[in-house]
Image (cartoon, rainbow, N blue to C red):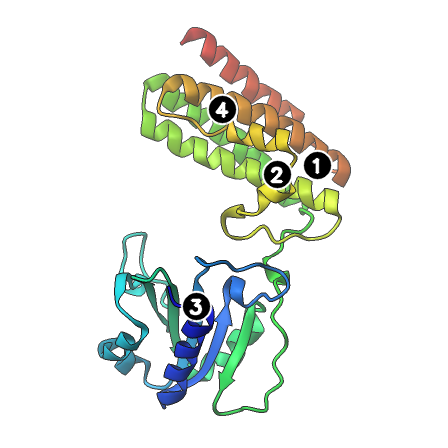
Amino acid sequence: MRTAEAVMALIMETAEADERVRAVALSGSRAAAGTSSPDLISDFDIIYFVDNIDQMIQNRAWLKVFGEPLIVQTPDEMNLYGEPSGEESFAFLMLFRDGNRIDLTLKPADSRYLHWKQDGLTRCLLDKDNPASDFPSPTDVGYKTSMPEENFFHQCCNEFWWVAVYVVKGWQRKEMLYAQAHLHIVRLMLIQMLQWKVVLEKKIPVNFGQEAKHLEIYLEEKNIRELAATYAAGSYESIWASLQAAMAMFARESASVAGQCGFTLNEQEAAGVQRYIKEAGRVQ
């Protein structure tokens, strides 16, 4: 497997040799020096700010220099999850046979200064047209979870209890996919509440990473076990048990967050849904 230094050298050499590439930026975990710890499987999130972006998209021979890919995805040519964003950019997501992954995005050269202002977690590696520029150091401030606003807190609670009813509907009808899909949404709301729990404990904003992947670092072992219990196996009994675990944990943590923040908790809503679900369990 090529070292990180070798991959970065290749990325920079390619950019420097190609006149169409006017600037290079590094984003993601590798850009956040001091706030993250990249490992062997961390992606290289690279942006090339280029002239003639259409030419580089249409003729892709220049990509061969990076190595033999195991699999490549070009999400801007796909509509599997909806229509493209319409942004003038194009990404090549490349996993190579040696295990390295480069997520290389092309953007118009004249958009680079606006990009650096909008995305604080970006490190300028090269600017051929303005080499003396003093760009600010990358910061993950924009990616941190802060204290919740009361309106957002209430929306989170409402979504949890509303969607919990849909889990029960799927459970009652023996619709496994439907029940599991809504249990996932319920869990997302629980994870949001747990992030606020941590922020309140730490008294500072926290970057939990993509899909809250770092949340476990901050939770006590008993909380981790409780959260794990909300993941159902492939049976209706486990779906019911996972929903009960999620409701118990959410009720406790939402009350705690509300109390610490001085929010008014809609106890009637939560209690009403819990009674409804309890009755549904009795008649099943």
Q: Is residue 87 visible?
A: no
- First in sequence, mark 3 or 1: give its number: 3
Does 159 sit above or below residue 77?
above
Which residue is painted at 56% across and 35% down in the image? Answer: 190
Which residue is painted at 32% across and 30% down in the image? Answer: 177
Secondary structure type for disc 4: helix
Q: Nearer the viewer, mark 3 or mark 4?
A: 3
Quadrant (top left, top right, bottom left, bottom right) of the N terminus: bottom left
The Cα–Cα distance between marks 3 and 1, rounded to whole angstroms, is 44 Å
Instruction: Please name the amino acid that badge 1 sits on.
Output: Val
According to the picture, the residue beneath numbered tag 2 turns out to be 193
Q: Is residue 95 left or right of residue 159?
A: left
Q: Nearest the camera: 274 or 30?
A: 30
Which residue is painted at 63% across and 77% down in the image? Answer: 136
Quadrant of residue 51 in the image?
Answer: bottom left
Q: Confirm or deny contact between disc 3 and disc 1 (CB under 8 A).
A: no
Instruction: Please name the amino acid that badge 4 sits on.
Output: Leu
- First in sequence, mark 3 or 4: give its number: 3
Quadrant of residue 255 in the image?
Answer: top right
